[in-house]
Image (cartoon, helix red, strand yellow):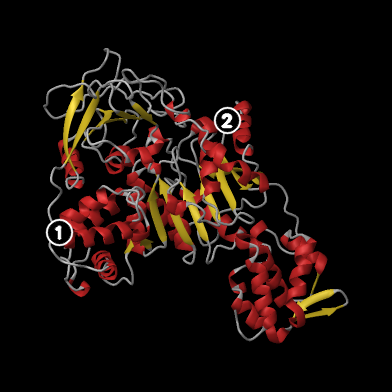
Amino acid sequence: MTGRNSSVDAVAAYLGGFGVRSRPLREILSLLTRASQPIEALIVATATPRRAVEDLLRNLGEDLTEDSGRFRIRPDMSTQYRAFFGLDEIAPGSGLGLGPGSDPGPGAGAGPVPAGLSGGAPVEALAALIAAAPAPRRDLDHVAATAQTLGRRVNWLSSTYDLAGRRVLFVGDHDLTSVALARACPRTEITVVDIDERTLAYIDETARAENLAIRTLFGDLRFTLPPAARDWADLVLTDPPYTPDGVGLFLGRGLSGLRDRVNGVVVVAYGHSRLHPMLGFQVQQSMQQFGVVFETILPAFNRYDGAQAVGSASDLYVCAPTTRTWKVLDRLAEGFGTRIYTHGRQSVESAARVDVGAATTVIGEATATGTGTPEGRLGEAAPTAPVSTAPVPAAPAVSAVPAAGAGTRRLGLRALFTGSDYLRDLRPDAEVAVDLTADPGPLLLRGLLAVTATRARFVVPADHPDVSARDARDQLAALVEPKYRLTFRPVPPADPGVARSVAVHAELVEGGAAAGGGFVARWLLERAHGRIGNVLREGVIRAAAGDGRTVSKNEARALVRALIIEPGQDGPRDGGGQDVLELTAMEVPRAALERLLTAVRGEPGAGVPSPGVPPSTAGRT
């Protein structure tokens, strides 16, 4: 607030009530500072309802002049309004591609790539960004959008919505639109949720190098939206798998990420072949069951290097929630299947079951000796992995899990991400078997974090990136070493047609980890669903007690914050403004988790302060 002009403050409060949708009202203010305008012209130029225009004029109070039905902000106040509301950065009607009195015509709003992004270095920079990105993964339905599409998305978003000071959530972002938007809109907070650790690492590295305000979170959206992304955003953008369940699920997760339930929107990229309109109908039905309104559908807005089955293009849907949305969201969002992709182990065509034997607790979608079917839709049959000739370490072949008696507890994979009470209540003699035969790569680590048992076995395909090469196995084993000792053993297939698997045997380290940093690291690894700041603080206190020292909560908190503050930073940040202390280990991307554990364990290049060591001398990473 200005503290000087009550009308400016009143207008600011009025615009604030529109959230990201306040841009047309700012365009009206811009018009009113330039010349006298009849109210009809203001309505037509910005496509704003008359009532909203009248309320804005009313809030302008004595700063507004009227002459024969034409309105204008007083010339002596125009400079103040233009500065306070940032009117110099917008062109009237830019959100619609309109000028005063113009007609939108067909396809208005899609617009060309903006002048600042068309041709020359900016688009070339986006092309270079895409070229250096991790290769698309077919099993995750990755298809790279063109650099021109990234520029077009940024232009459309920034000219349609007020993004300064707002939050934008990307539900999946292999396209890297988050980086393009962060470069163009530095005052916008951005969060990216993705299952692909490579994409998260690439975005995070770019954000760190360019000081972009991007936070990255790991999440398997089939099971949940990471807690840090829930009720967080003003606008959501997603380019989901083009199946009915894939589009519906990602839309549901996007809606769960909105904090503004009145003005928030979810922007969805989706395309289907014009030769198969029924598929498009099914997807639209999947979306509309959430009670959303399709405010806009911009045809062929997105273009891709690939996806020729849909013409290498997709439409842009602007989905606005209604009061019905919030009544049905929680129920519908958890009702989709896990096979949401069009290719690979998690595709809609995959249906083979895998028998992992039996155990006291079985987590996943496979059948198991003497057990029933998994609960709910998360218990659908798991697809099999393709046969791989990738080497595995020499070890005796064993069954996936040993036989167990009756009473086996069955849990869906969602329990790994929600912190099920059953995972916190395992008996000392519990034998836990986790079926990850459809794991696209990152779930093995998440399972090792989520499950704390004396003995656990994780069955993964033989070509899994964490087991198919010795270096990968060694890196995984080193990462969880304070908690588990890992061995890798091939699982003999039930029949020649079943894909090869590997059982990752995890045995809880006896007697606890080493004192100091080793103890604190294990404390964190065993409490992956707790907020990292709280978990590390308690770990430091208990480590000190084990050494016969007393550390208060405030002292422990200071030690933790000093440990992970990077040089030149003002707080415990990781990447582009990411406060890891507020996250859980389950939602921290792997690369960031590795840096955190390195710091906690006091390995070379880091250092964990012993209890009682002043924070100023603590190691940094």
> Which residue is more in the foreground, 187 or 250?
250
Provide the residue designation for mark 2.
273
Provide the residue designation for mark 1.
546
Looking at numbered disc 1 in the image, what kind of residue is underneath it?
Gly
The spot of residue 602 in percent (x, y) is 15, 59
Quarter occupied by the C terminus:
bottom left
Give the residue displayed 45% in from the left and 60% down from the top.
Answer: 182
The vertical placement of 455 against 104, above or below, is above
Name the secondary structure under disc 1: helix
Q: Is residue 360 left or right of residue 182?
A: left
> Which residue is more in the foreground, 160 or 303?
160
Q: Is residue 431 visible?
A: yes
Give the residue displayed 32% in from the left and 50% down from the top.
Answer: 585
Q: Is residue 348 left or right of residue 40?
A: left
The vertical placement of 271 against 386, above or below, is below
The spot of residue 366 in percent (x, y) is 35, 24
Q: Is residue 101 visible?
A: no
Q: Earlier in the sequence, mark 1 or mark 2?
A: 2
Q: Is residue 411 left or right of residue 620?
A: right
- Gap between marks 1 and 2 measured at Cα: 64 Å
- Callout 1: few (<14), some (14-19), or many (20+) C-alpha neighbours within 10 Å? few
The spot of residue 421 in percent (x, y) is 37, 41
Mark identifier at residue 424 = none
> Which residue is more in the foreground, 302 or 198?
198
Looking at numbered disc 2 in the image, what kind of residue is underneath it?
Ser
The vertical placement of 363 against 151, above or below, is above
